[in-house]
Image (tube, rainbow, N blue to C red):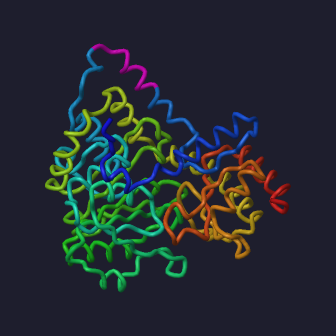
Amino acid sequence: MKEIRPADRVSEIQEYYFSRKLREVARLNAEGRDIISLGIGGPDRMPSAEVIDTLCTEAHKAGVHSYQPYVGIPELRKAMSRFYSTHYGVELDADTEIQPLIGSKEGILHVSLAFLNPGDGVLVPNPGYPTYTSVSRLVGAEIFNYDLTEENGWMPDFEALERLPLDRIKLMWINYPHMPTGTPATMELFEKIVDFGRRHGIVIAHDNPYSFILNDKPLSLLQVEGGKDVAIEMNSMSKSHNMAGWRVGMLASNPTFIQWVLKVKSNIDSGQFRPMMLAAAKGLDAPAEWYAELNDVYRSRRVVAEKIMSALGCTFDPRQRGLFLWGRIPDKEESSESLADKVLYGSRVFITPGFIFGPNGDRYVRISLCATEEKLSEALKRIEETYKTV
């Protein structure tokens, strides 16, 4: 039989770290190890009762189980427009400047396919969300990593960016509040990034799912004057509304960019379930009390997560925002991966090694707040009891 080989792009990427590592955690649990997972940013809380009630009520209606519009239903687009107006002060035309997504992770693929030809340059943060890198490789783009370092406050070095071959670069990924470091956005940073994109004709793609988690002042890149001309912003209900499994996100930009993304998206998926879109619209209209109550829970969890970091001998910036805590490992530790494995096998706690986010993350680990305070406290107890010996 003639050998069958996959496409070259398959060799350009690896299986997603969490896909592989969670199989290992599942195996340990099957052996009775009772692993506490503090690795994944998958909210464990419920969506609001109004969201669930809307889904259930609408799903019982006739005629809602067929294909839906590729652009989403008007009710959802209008709710997304209201969301941006209410929380960011950004006015978006619900018909032309918003595109619902089946999650912002899928949006990364849509944007990359819409803007990048094979060989085009793309700026990817190091450390940063691994999907920016893997999707860029899948579309055949040339990756230019830009360094984010603790010494520079995890912000881009614009002098270094100006030295890159910018005539070859078409797209730049940014993400603030930053994952994994928790660095919050500032309007000064956003103004510099929009200016950079406008001067060099580079599309700025801002992935913005964490702005409501432990963050008193949510910011949008589209708040910058002229930002909409060069910027695309993706937002998600996964983190802010406890709807990760629902796969509801949004993309906001100018009408031309939206149409280019829609051309790609409409050839990849067939829209979302109508009752789910109506439920998501209800969630987007949540009152301020909803976010305050959620953040009260995360604030209590964060206190325990900080104790875990300290028990591991890690240092961290208390000003971090978002769903995780990022800490620098002790100098005595070989690497973030070796420390994470020590904690996994010695203390039966799964934390994320920072190397998966890029080389600049290798001396760091990340702890998720998506576990109950009781689970976090148990993890702290295990680490305090065993870490000195693992």
**Quadrant housing the N terminus:** top left
Image height of 334 relative to 304, above or below: below
- Where residue 90 appears, as percent x and y from the top left, is 29, 58
**Quadrant housing the C terminus:** bottom right
Which residue is the extreme one toward the front? 1
Which residue is painted at 53% across and 66% down in the image?
A: 181
Which residue is painted at 54% across and 68% down in the image?
A: 361
How many marks overall? 0
**Camera-nearest residue between 301 and 83:** 301
Magenta highlight on residue 60: yes
Query: Which image quarter: residue 111?
Result: bottom left
Q: Is residue 348 left or right of residue 177?
A: right
Camera sees residue 196: yes
- Where residue 336 appears, as percent x and y from the top left, is 63, 65
**Camera-nearest residue between 168 and 326:** 168
- Where residue 9 appears, as percent x and y from the top left, is 32, 53
Q: Is residue 195 left or right of residue 148?
A: left
- Where residue 359 appears, as percent x and y from the top left, is 51, 70
Magenta highlight on residue 54: yes
Query: Which image quarter: residue 204?
Result: bottom left
**Camera-nearest residue between 187 and 363:** 363
Camera sees residue 85: no
- Residues in magenta, as a range: 53-62
Specify the principal SS of the magenta part. helix
